[in-house]
Each structure stands twice: as C-alpha cells, then as structure tokens.
C-alpha cells in the first residue's frame, strides 16, 4: 500500500515539473523567442484647451530608458513625436493645426530599442475656435450708472460683475493731450478710474476670455463696443451766485420775486412768489444780470425753467463776460443798437435759446463752442410764449461747465 502511494506521488511531481517547464518556454514561439519588455507608462495627463490647438502635460516617468513619446489621434491617422533629450520634472507639448472639435488622444512611451509602454488614453479634449469666439460678448457696463465724474475731472467707469471665464476688459480712450490710451479692467474689479479723459471723446471696450482655467490661449470678443458718451459736465455752484444788477436791467415785481429766486434750487416750474417776476416797467427785449461767483473757463450748457402758468420766455439770449468792470451798457436792451454796444463792452453771446413748447418744463441746451472764460451772466428776454411784452417769469436758471477743462 505504501509503495502504491509513493509511486502515485512521484508521478504527480513529474507531471507538475514537466508542465511548468513547458509553460515557461512555449510563449517564446509567439514572441519570436523574445521576452516582452514594457517601458514606463504615462500617468495622469492634464489637458489644456486652446485656439485650434491643445496642450498636454504629465509628470516625467521614473523609467530612465524612455527616449520618446508618441501621441496619436484621429484613430492613429495623425501623430506627434516627442523626443526626450534631457531629464525634466514634467513633459508637455502642444498639438497644433486642429479643428474646433472634441478629441481623444493615445500616448505611448518608447525606449531606444523600440519597446513601448501600455497606452494611456486621454478623452474629451476640446479645441476651441471661431465658433466659440462668435459667442463671446463684451463685459456689460452698469446701465443705471455707467460713469461718475468727480469735481476734479476724474471719471469712474462702472461695470457689472464679470463672468467667471472673463480675464480682462481693455478700455481705449483719448486723453487731454490728444493721445490714444489703453488701460485694462481686471475681472476682479468692477470700476476703473480715468484721470485724464478728454471730454466727449469716444471710449471703447473689448473683453477677453478663457474657455477653461487651464486654457493655453486667451480669446477676444469679436466686437469692440462703445461706452456711453462721457461728458464731464457739472452744474455751476449756485451757492456762489449773487445779484449784480446793471443799469436798465429788469427789477422785481415784488421784493421776494427778485433775481436771486433763479438759484433757489427749484427743479420744477414754480408759482408766485417762488420765482423771478419782472417789474413790467418797460417792454421787451429786457435784461437781468447776475454773478456766478467765480470764473468758469468752459461753460457748456444752460437750463431754464419757466413759471407754472404764464409769461414764460420762448426766445432769449444768454450773454457772458469774465470781468464786469466798465461792462455796463448805456443803451436800453430794447434799443436796436444794444447788441453792438454789448459786444463792444466785452460781452459774448453764449447762446440764443428758442423754445417751441409752453416754456414751463426744464429746457437744457448746449452753449456755443469756443467760448471765453465767463463769470457774469446776462439774460436778455426777447419774447414770451403768450405774447406778453412786459412781464417775464422764470423759475430757475442753471449753468453747466466742463470739469475736465476747468
């Protein structure tokens, strides 16, 4: 019995030994009598979208035998070889000449004998292009308050919160020396202050974006937009205004309807006695004069508000002068020679204002261009809406100047 057991065990041992020897050598006939050698495979790949191209990068392999990497795409119809000549911490490359499309890449490493690694697949890699660019819009400005002008002439542009993929917005303007200037508003900021903007000059803006935080390219919105026209106009300081009547000027109908009612701060047509009401002592045209309290080098606009009922001017002149010394006219303002005398005395006609309504509501107009410095204002009323020739009523007169050029 023992002999039978020994014989059986011996046979089994010989079978195992024979089987092992056969399996260790049989694969060679399938590998050309060579052992399979794999180089170090590529690890995690970071993808970087770009403009009709993509970037790929990964950590260097610890395998010192690697001499190149080959990247395949389009089902291996296209490829790019990266030869490794020096040891670096990371490997990176850019695949150029792509279409705007989603790609899959396969990456192999190779040693000098041609042995390769197992493949590393990289899927869903997007190359961006003109289709993506066509969807980009410039960062919007704050439509409620596009800009604010300070008394010093600084202009603060207000934009809405930037999109998360916004990089910056380039703003182009003309400075007061006539030079073209470009500044950038970062995505983290919503306001940008310009200290030297030329009043009324065009301001344009153009935003840049990235489709992904890893993007290797920055994309620019295809259209350059124009910012609302920035006029650095501020109202002349009415706290400095004071009466400065000249001979033959209109007097008040009553003491509390004098010229100083013209700067009492009202913003709507007023009723008696909260307005200037002429005395009616002569026929139109007639004048009134006041001092703005300081010289303004660049008056730009005038606004007039009539009475809430009647005797409102619909045709009047605004005259100005910097120094009133010896500026009083001798002729009455309804004399045909008055205008020539006023000019001879140094007065400048800033604007003839003509209204076509009932003369009540606030009415603002631009003054003439290239005006000299002005401190004293003279209003010469030529005609009233209702044809009244003696009594003139005005609720408010406001002047505006260009703070950029003051």
Image (tube, helix red, strand yellow):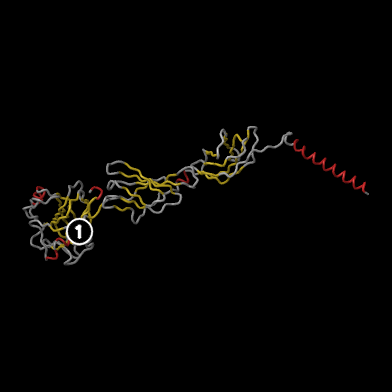
The picture places residue 359, in percent across and down from the top left corner, at 20, 60
Toward the left, the furthest residue is 330
Within 10 angstroms of label 1, few (less than 14), some, or many (20 or more) residues?
few
The picture places residue 89, in percent across and down from the top left corner, at 55, 39
Residue 261 position (above or below residue 104):
below
Q: Nearer the viewer, residue 99 or 33?
A: 33
* Residue at x 35%, y 53% (from the top left corner): 158
In the image, taking residue 108 as reference, residue 17 lies left or right, namely: right
In the image, taking residue 157 as reference, residue 120 lies left or right, namely: right
User: For the image shown, how many numbered marks are present on the structure?
Assistant: 1
* Residue at x 92%, y 48% (from the top left corner): 2
The picture places residue 3, in percent across and down from the top left corner, at 93, 46
The picture places residue 103, in percent across and down from the top left corner, at 56, 43
Q: What element does badge 1 sit on?
A: helix
Toward the front, the furthest residue is 2
* Residue at x 18%, y 57% (from the top left corner): 240
Q: Nearer the viewer, residue 115 or 363?
A: 115
Q: Which residue is mark 1?
A: 239
Residue 29 position (above or below residue 240):
above
Q: Quadrant of residue 66?
A: top right
Q: Nearer the viewer, residue 314 or 39?
A: 39
Toward the bottom, the furthest residue is 272
């Amino acid at each position: 019995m023992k002999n039978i057991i020994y014989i059986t065990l011996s046979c089994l041992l010989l079978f195992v030994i024979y089987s092992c020897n056969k399996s260790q050598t049989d694969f060679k006939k399938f590998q050309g009598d060579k052992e399979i050698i794999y180089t170090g495979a590529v690890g995690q790949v970071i993808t970087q979208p770009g403009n009709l191209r993509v970037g790929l990068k990964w950590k260097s392999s610890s395998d010192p035998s690697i001499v190149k990497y080959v990247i395949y795409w389009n089902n291996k119809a296209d490829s790019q070889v990266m030869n490794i000549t020096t040891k670096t911490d990371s490997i990176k490359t850019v695949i150029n000449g792509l279409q705007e499309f989603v790609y899959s890449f396969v990456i192999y490493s190779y040693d000098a004998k041609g042995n390769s690694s197992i493949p590393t697949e990289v899927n869903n890699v997007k190359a961006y292009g003109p289709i993506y660019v066509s969807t980009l819009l410039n960062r919007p400005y704050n439509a409620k308050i596009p800009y604010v002008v300070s008394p010093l002439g600084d202009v603060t542009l207000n934009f809405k919160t930037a999109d998360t993929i916004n990089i910056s917005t380039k703003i182009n303007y003309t400075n007061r020396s006539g030079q073209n200037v470009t500044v950038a508003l970062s995505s983290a900021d919503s306001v940008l202050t310009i200290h030297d903007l030329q009043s009324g000059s065009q301001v344009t803006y153009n935003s840049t974006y990235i489709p992904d935080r890893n993007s290797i390219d920055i994309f620019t919105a295809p259209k350059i937009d124009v910012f609302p026209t920035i006029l650095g106009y501020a109202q002349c300081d009415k706290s400095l205004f004071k009466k400065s009547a000249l001979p033959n000027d209109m007097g008040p109908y009553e003491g509390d309807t004098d010229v100083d009612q013209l700067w009492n701060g009202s913003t709507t047509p007023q009723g008696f006695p909260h307005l200037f009401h002429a005395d009616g002592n002569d026929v139109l045209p007639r004048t009134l004069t006041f001092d703005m309290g300081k010289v303004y080098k660049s008056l730009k606009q005038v606004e007039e508000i009539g009475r809430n009922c009647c005797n409102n001017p619909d045709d009047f002149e605004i005259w100005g002068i910097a120094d009133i010394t010896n500026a009083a006219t001798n002729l009455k303002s309804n004399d045909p020679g008055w205008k020539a005398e006023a000019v001879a005395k140094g007065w400048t006609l800033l604007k003839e204002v003509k209204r076509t309504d009932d003369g009540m509501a606030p009415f603002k107009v631009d003054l003439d261009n290239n005006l000299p410095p002005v401190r004293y204002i003279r209003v010469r009323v030529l005609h009233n809406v209702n044809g009244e020739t003696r009594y003139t009523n005005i609720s408010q007169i406001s002047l505006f100047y260009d703070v950029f050029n003051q």
